[in-house]
Image (cartoon, grey):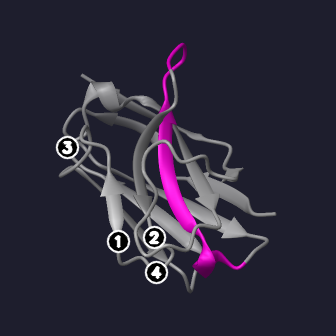
Amino acid sequence: QVQLIESGGGLVQAGGSLRLSCAASGRTFSTYTMGWFRQVPGEEREFVAAISWSGRSAYYAPSVRGRFTISRDNAKDTVYLQMNSLKPEDTAVYYCAAAPYSDPQPPGPNYEYDYWGQGTQVTVSS
């Protein structure tokens, strides 16, 4: 089993930046594909970004492409989400997810991940 601990959420003004971190433990992190999702109360969970186990390939939702960057440091068992040019519509609870998916390309937005973090709130004011 993999445990995920997230940090870095907070309140920012539109146009600002935040960097989310997700630290993993319990399994061999370097073999896991990692993803970020977000959810607004009353709405469905939305895919944000995913990164392959090697860190060489990433996939982004169109709504965040060009503004967000996912990265990972396998030596630290940590995945990051750098969020720039934040918009009020980015406000959500952000979740880190992990899966034993070893393809060189990350899975698509509908892939069902095995492990999830507790979530961290991101609020963007206008």
Tell me the residue that label 4 is attached to: 54
Residue 123 lies, with reference to residue 70, above or below; the image says above
Give the residue drawn at x 67%, y 56%.
5
Give the alpha-carbon distance from disc 2 to disc 4, as whole Å: 5 Å
Tell me the residue that label 2 is attached to: 52
- What label sits on residue 84 in the rendered view? none
Give the alpha-carbon distance from disc 4 to disc 1, as whole Å: 7 Å
Give the alpha-carbon distance from disc 3 to disc 2, as whole Å: 24 Å
Contact, mark 2 vs mark 1 (Cβ under 8 Å): yes
Q: In which quarter of the image is residue 100?
A: bottom right
Give the alpha-carbon distance from disc 3 to disc 1, as whole Å: 22 Å
Contact, mark 3 vs mark 2 (Cβ under 8 Å): no
Give the alpha-carbon distance from disc 4 to disc 3, as whole Å: 27 Å
Seen in the image, is 55 located left or right of residue 64?
right
Give the residue drawn at x 34%, y 32%.
90
Please name the amino acid that badge 2 sits on. Ser
Tell me the residue that label 1 is attached to: 57
Contact, mark 3 vs mark 1 (Cβ under 8 Å): no
Please name the amino acid that badge 1 sits on. Ser
Crowding at mark 4 (Cα within 10 Å: few <14, some 14-19, many 20+)? some
Residue furthest out toward the bottom:
75
Q: Which portion, as a residue range, is magenta?
A: 28-43
Residue furthest out toward the top:
42
